[in-house]
Amino acid sequence: MGPMIALFALLIAVDAGTPVTPNAPTATSVAAPTLRDAKVVLADYAKAIGDEKLWKKHKSVRVKREVSVKAMQFVSQEETRVVRGGKILGESQMPGMGTFRRGSDGRTVWAEDPIGGLRVLKDAEAEDVQLGAAWNSEWHLAEMYAKVISVPPPKTAPTGQPLECVELHKKKGQPTTLCFDGSKHLRVWEQGVQASQGGQVPYATRFSDWRPVDGVQLWHHEVVTVGPVTMEGQIVELKFDEPFPANLFALPRKK
Amino acid sequence: MRSFPRLSLGFLLTVSACAGTTRPPQPQTTAPVSDAARRTDPPAFAPLAGQDVPVRAAMGPGKVQLEVRQAIFTAAWTAVRDKDFDKALVDKEWAPLRSKYEPLAMAAPDEATFYRLVNEMMGGLGQSHLEVHGPGETPEEDRPEPQASSSQAAAEVIVVGMGTGDPGVIVREIERKATVFSVRPDSSAARAGLRPGYLVTHIGGRAVADLPTSVRALRPVEERFRLRRHAARLLSGPVGTKVSVRFIDGNDQPHETMLVRDPADRPSVQVLLMPPIVPEVRTTHAGDVGIVAFNFFLLQPILAEVQKAIESFRRSGAKAIIFDLRGNPGGFGGMAIPVAARLVSREMSLGTIQFRDFANTLAVAPPLDSKPFLGKVIILTDEGSASTSEILAAGLQETKRASVVGDNTVGAALGSTIEALPGGAVMQIPVAGFKTPQGIAIEGRGVQPDRRVLETRAALLAGHDPVLDEALQLAHSAR
């Protein structure tokens, strides 16, 4: 049982194009007539989000997000801190349920929450956290994964716009499919299976509300579907280069 | 940096609070937890406060009412179609049920009838955790006492405070009769002289045994569950109001008394769309046996208190812990995991929850930051133990980590979500099935105790709790 921390949603684009509308009216799915090489698709994405140098000038970021499940009238707050070098801490404050945390100091990946208690994560669970902690991952997706291949848009992907999709094969976990706007090359859709203490959890995410953040494009809104639950995440605050305590990301000590 | 899906939220928001296994469904049962402070449970969910309530039509629904009803009906029907875990069942049964019930519900003379019909439609699927409530619904039990049944009752019903209270008595079916199971010390019921073992014939002027008709045959344990819930709903009401109770004492003498619905003695909590719940954890010792009882599976604040109790028993060298889950209707399904984790020395599974398109194991592992209790574990159950109570009991029983003592549980073990519908209505939807590690579904079956022990009127009148006595004997035999 891992936390439901939405680390964040970082996306960038040189061109501050029209945000993708998350619930735009749908039409027939229009796939690219031929599949471009996955590495080319990912390179276009990297260009679209902006110059990596703009991101690399920072050393850390803290993102606050509001997560809501409208059908349940449920709202939670989550905060994620990432520091170069693979350090990450995501915390979700769940009303009536407690605090759910996931972190890594670059070596040990861990989780702590009311259900699973304090755990050291391994294998695919740890890999997912480590992927989330990678500082420049958006510019280096092709290198971060064991294999990347172009695939047609999944049937569940949004329709009404040309999409280019890439399947990212993790080293340990199951593949993730990322789909990009065929013209703006921004991330539109992701679906995959995430490892948890209880097994594999399929999910799908739609990204939107692109805004420039210090020169790079970042999606600020996402709609995530996990089984019967649909939740929305909205970035409400983002700060770079704040000082964090040195032990913030380490495995919490036994009580 | 990649997006990091909130992978567990789906499960976390799954509530395994049993709202009822009978039809017409109504908010849930009572939750007696131990020998003393037993507090009437709130329903698993309730209509949203502050919503517009359609005006009840004297001669039939008006245009606005019809629009609201249609919106509620459509949303409820669609939610089941899209989210109910048993897609094969829904594909087969759901459209015909709509055809049958939609015209009836829309033509209902009042909202109570509308909701009853919608819930009858839901009941056609034969699942627990599936029901709708909304503004304008007035279950039979909520109506004021009839003037004729009690000379004082109706006239003395006054609201003196906010919130729901109860007079401090739990009524269960024991030896086929509605019987006082427990009386909260210093409660209105205690002051009026009610004692465990007394028979209760009428509450609020209504015969306790006069239950609403069920449209399907119920298992005996469901009948007992339903009576318990029915009595609890008759007893509960706005704090400060009064309710008449007719009872037969230990000498078989009839009495009638007027009880006051006492306020809760601690703050309530509200999570998701569930109504306020008064959390209660009680811990006691019987020699070197620890006993912990709690009335709901809540991550806050109950989990921490239960963990604290387990740790306290472990530190004090207790030989056994008895978990009294009698009357516990469930709550957050996930809470079964951290409770079990404090009782095992190695990884194990409590079972599997099956959503429509994926399954998850209820994986239990001893946490890094605490030591588990490794003595004997005994779980007490009865017909009011439902849902997460059943998940915990079944999982620990099947893996031989716990012995179960008491009565069969009701068999209402599904994962559900509680969602808002249009017009202030609220719905509980079963979104996940549950099976034990050996693949046994508890829904519709219940947990069968290792030692089936039933309370008797004679034992209650004598001040005994036969189920707890048996558990203590079992605990001591473990030495």
Image: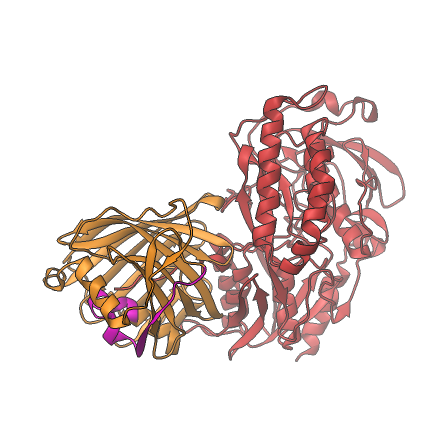
Chain colours: A orange, B red
Q: Is residue B203 above or below residue B462?
A: above
Q: Is residue A38 above or below residue B231?
A: below
Residue at the spot x=76%, y=70% of the render? B451
Residue B445: % across, % down: 74, 63
- Asked whether residue A141 is drawn in magenta, I would say yes
For the N terminus of chain B, the image quarter is: bottom left
Report the front residue among A116 and A11.
Answer: A11
Report the front residue among B408 and A213.
Answer: A213
Residue B167 is at least partly visible in this image: yes
Residue B428: % across, % down: 60, 47
Residue A98: % across, % down: 41, 55
Report the front residue among A143 and A198.
Answer: A143
Q: Would you identify the image quadrant in which residue A70 lies?
A: top left
For the C terminus of chain B, the image quarter is: bottom right
Residue at the spot x=19%, y=58% of the render? A48
- Asked whether residue B21 is drawn in magenta, I would say no
Residue at the spot x=80%, y=56% of the render? B219
Residue at the spot x=84%, y=35% of the render? B255
Report the front residue among B236 and B9.
Answer: B9
The span shown in magenta is A131-155
Residue B235 is at least partly visible in this image: no
